[in-house]
Image (tube, rainbow, N blue to C red):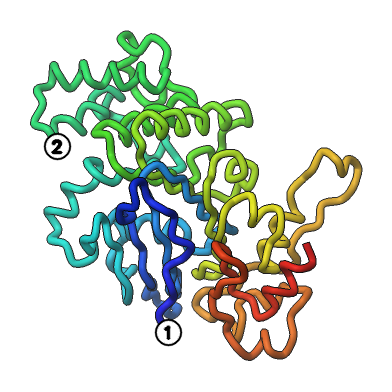
Amino acid sequence: MTSPVLSPYEPVAGGAPLLEVDDLYVEFRTDYGIVHAVNGISYTLAAGETLAILGESGCGKSVSAQTIMGILDTPPGFVTGGEIRYKGRNLLTMPAKEQRDLRGEEISIVFQDALSSLNPVFTVGSQIGEMFRRHRGTSRKDAKKAAIELMDRVRIPSAKERVGDYPHQFSGGMRQRVMIAMAIALDPAILIADEPTTALDVTVQAQIMDLLAELQKETGMGLILITHDLGVVGEIADRVAVMYAGRIVETGATDAVFSAPAMPYTEGLMASIARVDQKGQRLNPIVGAPPDLANLPNGCPFHPRCPRATDLCRRDLPELLEVVPGRRSACHYRDEVLRDH
């Protein structure tokens, strides 16, 4: 069954969304069986909007981002259904050269591990400047000048002196700023930030997120934030899509979802956050572990961990349906869960 597009954000001046992911399926064919990494997800993104995609590790967040960027390893990864439309054009059927030209120019990504994403044998300036040389045919001299301006833009101190330094000469936070500079070099319409604050301390995390928010305000780009950090989501996201076992299980405006979840998994995520008004109390984690994506259980994938599960949950897979305007949940008892808040 085709999943409906989720909670469409009203684009500026009533225009079409920048990005439409429609009923996307991705699987990995391995020696141990088929891993169903993404199972029919749908969402839209508008100019200037921040959409957060959150969930535990292994739920399909990063795989969906790789598929949008056209960098999914094939094999073993294969797109088996759905469309990804950028300004109305299906990226999945676009010629390979056109897809490559779109990367960086129109859609860009910031990966979570800057040290492994940057080439250790090239200076950061040459790696930033490569964006201009590859896409704009800029000379090396002008590309270096543009790299310095970008390093200043992302607030790397002494950019003119540091443009010739190598990745290992920068701190984790500064390397992430270099990655952001590369990602925004060509003023893309969409930026995907895949766990951009992983392994950074709290102060640096806040600086990176403030920088992304500032750049978004400057350029009007759409931002997809992939994370499991609920605090970050609550600060900057307009809308949230919660993923579990390769599916979107709840979506809606961030404040509404956080204050009154309509799906037990989201409820569990909210309950596991440390809060200042619960000093000295134990956290309430979600019991058990996420399911094996090569061997999903019958019914709702969350039912083995769900305190509300019934025989219906063990038997039938719930559809992602509207609970109230702008809110959708994949739970047989969505109305009851929402009422409890």
Residue type marked 1: Met
282 vs 233, nearest the viewer: 233
180 over 264 or under it: above or below: above
Q: Is residue 30 above or below residue 132?
A: below
Residue in the picture at 57% in, 54% down = 253
- Please state which amino acid type lies under the numbered disc 2: His
The reply, left or right, for residue 129 in relation to residue 216 is left
Which comes sooner in the sequence, label 1 or label 2? 1
270 relative to 22 in the view: left or right = right
Contact check, label 1 and label 2, Cβ < 8 Å: no
* Disc 1: which residue: 1
- In this figure, which residue is indicated by the disc labeled 2? 135
Q: Whole-Å distance between the Cαs marked 1 and 2?
A: 40 Å
**What crowding class fits label 1: few (fewer than 14 Cα within 10 Å), some (14-19), or many (20 or more)?**
few
Question: Given the current orientation, which residue lies at the most extreme right position?
Answer: 280
Examine the rendered structure and indicate whether residue 68 appears above or below residue 40: above
Front position among marks 1 and 2: 1
Instruction: State which quadrant residue 249 falls in.
Output: bottom right
Q: Residue at x 59, y 74 (%)?
A: 330
The image position of residue 51, as x and y in percent, is: 47, 50
Residue 283: horizontal and vertical position, in percent? 82, 52
As drawn, the label of residue 63 is none
Task: Report x, y in % for residue 205.
Answer: 57, 32
Above or below: residue 51 compared with residue 141: below
Give the residue drawn at x 76%, y 68%.
Answer: 339
Q: Secondary structure at mark 2?
A: helix
Quarter holding the N terminus is bottom left
Name which quarter of the figure residue 96 lies in: bottom left
Q: 101 left or right of 67?
A: left
